Image (cartoon, rainbow, N blue to C red):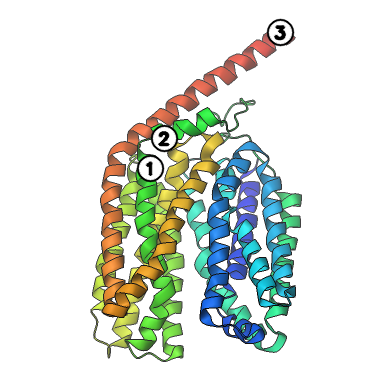
C-alpha cells in the first residue's frame, strides 16, 4: 500500500463527511421555506429534527457492531447510499407526517462515522492518527458553510425540494466512489507490531471482546469528559446566533460575519489540535491528553473573556471569539485518536460508537438546559455558566484520564506484540510445511 493511496482514501472520506454534513445541516437555513410549505409551527418543525437525532443516537451501537463484524468499505458505501436515498424521499414528501417520517429516516446514516474512523486507524499508524482525524473533523464547520451557501444561493430559486435532490444525488455519487476506490484493511494492520508482517491473524468482534472494553480504565472516563465537553458545543451552536442578535444588538449580517470568523478558526483548530497531539504523543503517551486538556481550559478562559467584552466593542469581541474558536476543537482529534490507542482493532468501531452515543446524550440536554436558564436570567448567563462549568469538568476528567492512559496504551501494545508473535510463528510453520 502506497502513501499516496492512503491519502486518497482520506480524501474520499473527507469528501463523504463534508457533503454529508452539508446535507445534514442544510435543513437549518431552509427551515422557514419548509414550515411555510407544510403550514407548521416551530414545535412541529423542532420535532422533525429531534426524531432524526433520536434515530441516529439509537443506531450508533448497531453501526458500531456491524463495522467490527463485516467489511467496512461496503458498509460505508451503504451508509452513503442510505444518505442519498432518504434525502430524496424527504424531498418527495407530500405532507407533514410523511416529511417527519422520511426526515427521521435520514438519521439512519448519521451514526455511520465510527467505521470510517476505525478503517482510517488501519490505514494510518498511531503517530499520524491525530492529524488525520483532525482533518476529518474539519468537515463539520466547513459543511455548515457549504450547506448555508447552498441554501441561500439555490433555495430561493430552486426551492428546498430541488436542493435536497442535489445533496441526495451527492450521497449516491459518493457511494459509487467508495465502492470503486476504498478497500477494507485487516484489522490492526497499521499497528507498529503488525505493520511489517506479510500475514496477520483475523480478529472480529465477539461479546467477550466487548466485555473487555469495560476493563479499560481510561475509556469510560474518556466518554464522560466527552459528555460534558459536548454540552458547550451544542449550547453555542443552538443559541449563540440568537445571543448575538438579541443581547448584543447585532444585525443578521454582523452576526453571520462573527460566526463565519469563529467557524474559520474552529476549522483551523481541528487541524492544529490533531497535529499537536501527534507531535506530543511521540514524546509521551500522555501527549494527546495534555493537548486536549490544555485546549479545553484555554477555551473556557477565552470564552469568559470574550463574553465580558462590552457590547459596543464589536471588533475586539470578534477577534477574541476567533481566538476562542482555535482552542475549542483541539480536544476533539486528540480524544478521537486516543480510542484506537487503547482499544483492540476488532472493537474500535463499537468503542467509537458508544462514545458518540454518550456524547449525544449530552447534546440532547444542552439546548433545553440553556433555554431554561435563559428564561430565568439571560442567554449571556446561560452560555457562560454551562460552557465554562462543563469545560472545566471535562478538563478535570482528562487529568484522571492522563493518569490511567499510559497503562492502557501499554496493555494494548502487549496484546499487539503477542498477536505479532503468533502470526510470525504461524507463518514460519506454514513455510516449514511447504518446504
The structure residue drawn at horizontal position 36% and vertical position 74%, both measured from the top left corner, is 371
The residue wearing badge 1 is: 220
Instruction: Please provide percent x and percent y for residue 259.
Output: 43, 78
**Image position of 53 (left or right of 85):** left
- Of labels 3 and 2, earlier in sequence is 2
The residue wearing badge 3 is: 433
CA separation, marks 2 and 1?
A: 8 Å
The residue wearing badge 2 is: 214
**Image position of 278 (left or right of 427):** left
Label 1: which secondary element: helix
Question: Which of the two residues, 350 or 125, is positioned nearer the viewer here?
Answer: 350
State if disc 1 and disc 2 touch (CB < 8 Å).
Answer: yes
The structure residue drawn at horizontal position 72% and vertical position 74%, both measured from the top left corner, is 93
- Of labels 2 and 1, earlier in sequence is 2
Instruction: Please provide percent x and percent y for residue 243.
Output: 36, 82
* Quadrant position of the C terminus in the picture: top right
Amino acid at each position: 500500500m502506497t502513501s499516496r493511496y492512503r491519502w486518497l482514501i482520506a480524501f474520499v472520506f473527507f469528501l463523504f463527511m463534508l457533503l454529508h454534513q452539508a446535507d445534514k445541516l442544510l435543513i437549518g437555513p431552509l427551515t422557514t421555506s419548509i414550515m411555510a410549505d407544510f403550514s407548521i409551527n416551530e414545535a412541529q418543525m423542532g420535532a422533525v429534527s429531534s426524531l432524526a437525532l433520536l434515530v441516529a443516537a439509537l443506531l450508533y451501537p448497531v453501526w458500531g457492531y456491524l463495522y467490527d463484524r463485516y467489511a467496512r468499505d461496503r458498509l460505508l458505501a451503504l451508509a452513503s447510499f442510505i444518505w442519498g436515498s432518504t434525502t430524496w424521499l424527504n424531498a418527495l414528501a407530500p405532507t407533514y407526517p410523511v416529511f417527519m417520517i422520511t426526515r427521521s429516516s435520514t438519521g439512519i446514516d448519521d451514526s455511520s462515522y465510527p467505521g470510517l474512523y476505525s478503517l482510517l486507524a488501519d490505514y494510518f499508524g498511531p503517530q499520524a492518527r491525530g492529524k488525520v482525524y483532525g482533518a476529518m473533523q474539519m468537515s463539520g464547520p466547513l459543511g455548515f458553510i457549504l450547506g448555508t451557501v447552498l441554501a441561500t444561493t439555490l433555495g430561493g430559486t430552486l426551492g428546498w425540494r430541488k436542493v435536497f435532490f442535489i445533496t441526495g444525488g451527492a450521497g449516491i455519487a459518493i457511494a459509487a466512489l467508495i465502492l470503486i476506490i476504498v478497500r477494507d484493511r485487516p484489522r490492526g494492520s497499521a499497528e507498529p507490531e503488525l505493520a511489517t508482517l506479510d500475514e496477520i491473524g483475523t480478529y472480529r468482534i465477539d461479546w467477550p471482546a466487548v466485555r473487555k472494553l469495560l476493563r479499560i480504565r481510561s475509556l469510560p472516563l474518556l466518554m464522560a469528559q466527552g459528555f460534558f465537553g459536548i454540552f458547550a458545543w451544542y449550547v453555542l451552536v443552538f443559541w449563540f446566533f440568537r445571543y448575538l442578535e438579541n443581547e448584543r444588538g447585532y444585525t443578521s449580517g454582523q452576526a453571520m460575519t462573527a460566526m463565519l470568523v469563529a467557524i474559520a478558526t474552529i476549522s483551523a483548530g481541528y487541524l492544529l489540535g490533531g497535529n499537536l497531539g501527534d507531535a506530543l504523543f511521540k514524546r509521551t503517551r500522555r501527549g494527546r491528553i495534555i493537548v486536549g486538556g490544555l485546549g479545553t481550559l484555554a477555551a473556557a478562559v477565552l470564552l469568559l473573556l470574550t463574553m465580558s467584552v462590552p457590547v459596543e466593542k464589536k471588533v475586539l469581541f470578534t477577534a477574541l471569539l476567533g481566538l476562542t474558536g482555535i482552542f475549542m476543537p483541539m480536544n476533539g482529534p486528540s480524544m478521537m485518536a486516543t480510542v484506537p490507542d487503547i482499544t483492540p482493532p476488532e472493537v474500535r468501531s463499537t468503542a467509537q460508537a458508544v462514545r458518540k452515543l454518550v456524547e449525544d446524550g449530552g447534546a440532547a440536554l444542552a439546548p433545553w438546559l440553556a433555554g431554561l436558564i435563559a428564561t430565568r436570567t439571560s442567554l449571556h448567563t446561560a452560555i457562560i455558566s454551562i460552557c465554562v462549568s462543563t469545560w472545566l469538568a471535562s478538563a478535570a476528567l482528562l487529568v484522571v484520564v492522563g493518569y490511567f492512559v499510559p497503562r492502557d496504551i501499554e496493555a494494548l501494545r502487549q496484546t499487539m506484540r503477542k498477536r505479532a508473535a503468533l502470526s510470525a510463528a504461524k507463518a514460519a510453520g506454514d513455510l516449514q510445511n511447504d518446504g
